[in-house]
Image: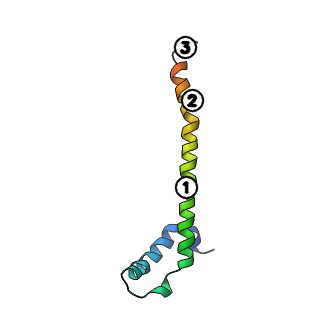
Amino acid sequence: MTEDDTDILVWSERLADPLRRVAAGTRSNDQVDRGNIIEEIESVGKEKHHAVGSLLLRALLHMPKAEIWTVSRDVAH
């Protein structure tokens, strides 16, 4: 396993310069790992989608608790 496989920041910094050159029209295709870029973009998208779903579920689970708490704190115990 390479450092690129474990550290997305290192991977993204390593590929940023060649990608900028490609975007500017300079030929540097030999330095761009397109397959890995595609995989990583898909992975980040899926990760973000999962994170949003997880946070939404957590919020929905806590909403009834918050509602009950405001009512129950005024009840004599």
Quadrant of res 49: bottom right
List x then y, in percent, for residue 63.
54, 33
Quadrant of res 1: bottom right
Per the image, label 1 sits on a secondary structure element best described as: helix
Please, is residue 36 above or below residue 66 in the view? below
| Disc number for residue 75 | 3
List x then y, in percent, for residue 17.
41, 78
Dot 2: within a 10 Å radius of its alpha carbon, few (fewer than 14), some, or many (20 or more) residues?
few
List x then y, in percent, for residue 3.
56, 73
- The answer to which of marks 1 and 3 sits earlier in the sequence is 1
**Amino acid on which disc 3 is placed:** Val
Per the image, label 3 sits on a secondary structure element best described as: loop
**Amino acid on which disc 2 is placed:** Lys
Do the residues bearing badges 2 and 1 touch, measured as CB atoms within 8 Å? no
Q: Which of the pair 10/18 is nearer the observer?
A: 18
**Amino acid on which disc 1 is placed:** His
| Disc number for residue 65 | 2
- According to the picture, the residue beneath numbered tag 1 turns out to be 49
Q: Nearer the viewer, mark 1 or mark 3?
A: 1
Measure the alpha-carbon separation of dots 1 and 3.
40 Å
Q: Residue at x 55, y 52 (%)?
A: 51
Dot 1: within a 10 Å radius of its alpha carbon, few (fewer than 14), some, or many (20 or more) residues?
few
List x then y, in percent, for residue 61.
59, 36
Q: Which of the pair 42/1 is nearer the observer?
A: 42
Please, is residue 57 above or below residue 51 in the view? above
Measure the alpha-carbon separation of dots 2 and 1.
25 Å
- The answer to which of marks 2 and 1 sits earlier in the sequence is 1
Per the image, label 2 sits on a secondary structure element best described as: helix
Q: Residue at x 57, y 60 (%)?
A: 46
Do the residues bearing badges 1 and 3 touch, measured as CB atoms within 8 Å? no
